[in-house]
Image: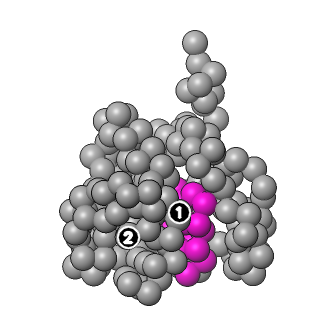
Amino acid sequence: MKGLVLVTDGFEDSEFSYPFYRLRESGWDVDVATPDGDSVTGEHGYEFDGNVAIDEESPSWFAEEYDLLVVPGGDSPEALRTEAPAAADVVAAFDDREKPIAAICHGAQLLISADILAGRRATGYWSLEVDVENAGAEYVDEPVVVDENLVTSRVPDDLPAFMDATLRLVEADPEAEPAAARV
């Protein structure tokens, strides 16, 4: 299984690192797509290497090549809108193919730009409630919301629930008991 993290400088460090390492621990190959394919630095100074440039491949290539898209929050989603407008097209291509998209916190900004929220349920950082609703979605103030292929969460404290729901979705068993509750 192959996952893709879509990010640029200013991401919330834990919202990048937690999903990145959780997926790798689960046996996934995880690539990091940045505007130029170079390394990126988070809000708290952590640096991660990028290995795919967003503009070097078509959005449909990403959706064909990868099984899961992760969009961390922080300042990254807003910056991607201007630094790499094709990032929203990558999100839309994943959604067109009904492939899993996991977005946390301000990651909802990129979902809005991709125009994939109409008629859905989603969550994100509290200040995005009106934006999510204006995009046509029902904003739900819960730690994690799953709507078909879309997993959304609000804040770093929601990361365990976010990744449990994401892994259950990609394992094709969304009704499975969360890992924390298994004996």
The residue nearer to you, when weighing 149 against 54, is 54
Q: Amino acid at mark 2?
A: Thr
**Residue 116 can be seen, yes or no:** no
Q: Which disc, if any, is residue 73?
A: 1
Q: Which residues are magenta?
A: 93-113
Give me the residue at 51% from left, 71% from top. Answer: 75
- Residue 135 location, quadrant: bottom right
Question: Does the magenta run of residues contain 178?
Answer: no
Disc 1 marks a residue whose amino acid type is Gly
Q: Is residue 83 visible?
A: yes
What residue would you read off at disc 2?
8
Per the image, is 106 magenta? yes
Residue 30 against residue 118 in the figure, above or below: above
Residue 11 percent coordinates (x, y)? 45, 63
User: Is residue 4 positioned above or below 1 on the image?
Assistant: below
For residue 103, what is the image quadrant?
bottom right
The disc, 2 or 1, on the residue closer to the chain's N-terminal end is 2
